[in-house]
Image (tube, rainbow, N blue to C red):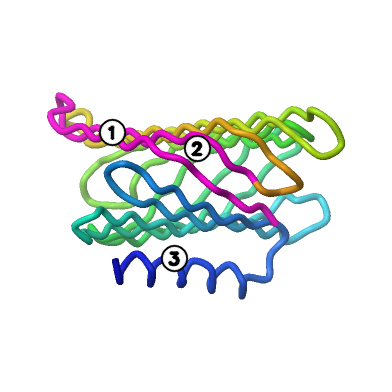
Amino acid sequence: MRRIVVLTTLAVLVLWNAKTTAQSLELMPGIERIFVDVQWLKTFDQNRKWSLFSRSRATVDYEENTDLFTGAYLNYTTPSGFGGTIVGRISTGGAGGDVGGHFFKAKESFLVYALASVAIDTEFAYSWFSIVRYTPRLNDTWRVYTSLELFSNLNTDGHVASVQRLRAGIDRQGYQFGLALNLAGLGKDYSTTDTNPGVFVRKQF
């Protein structure tokens, strides 16, 4: 329980001190574990060609086993939405980097970010990461909030790991809440799987 309180507190402090153009904090209590996700985005020019996206997330199960991840995505995006990305990441399992290409589009009620990348390492590995959000307006105060996040990592032997995160709920002036489902599969034949349904509360600044 102490780790859960500490992780939640750290996430709030990181968010409070970030000087960015967009940021969010999500807390998801699930049946198997608690998930905390802090994201921020900073653009460096008026046309938003150069941007830095960062996220820090943590999971803690009810036996206080912890998993941490922090990633920074430096993007150059052309007017078409396509561009290049350099990724730096640190996690419980180690650190590394990736290079790849992405597609990004954001509208008033729709956002998509998709990245295909290759690891900068002696062993060949590649991954796919994408976020799709659809938030149609119901009235001046309320919106529908839906989000789908996908991640897959593969190497020369085949599948290594994959994650799917689904959110469905409502938004009231930047506060989102509803139902959540985190899924994971590990191994070449998905020999290890994990299902963590729950609820989520998210604040977008």
Q: Write down the residue under mark 1.
A: 195
**Among numbered discs 2 and 1, the one appearing first in the sequence:** 2
Q: Are marks 3 and 1 in contact (CB under 8 Å)?
A: no
Q: Secondary structure at mark 3?
A: helix
Label 3 amino acid?
Thr
Q: Write down the residue under mark 2.
A: 115
Magenta part of the chain: 176-205
Q: Which mark is residue 8?
A: 3
Vertical placement of 54 versus 201: above or below? below
State the image coordinates of residue 189 (x, y, percent, origin top left): 15, 24
* Main secondary structure along the magenta-highlighted residues: strand
State the image coordinates of residue 108 (x, y, percent, origin top left): 79, 35
**From the image, which quarter does the N terminus lie in?**
bottom left
Label 1 amino acid?
Thr
Q: CA distance from mark 3 to mark 2?
A: 28 Å
Pointer 1 local density, CA inside 10 Å: few below 14, some 14–19, many at least 20: some
Residue drawn where x is 61% and y is 72% of the image:
16
Which of pointers 3 and 2 indicates the residue nearer the eye? Answer: 3
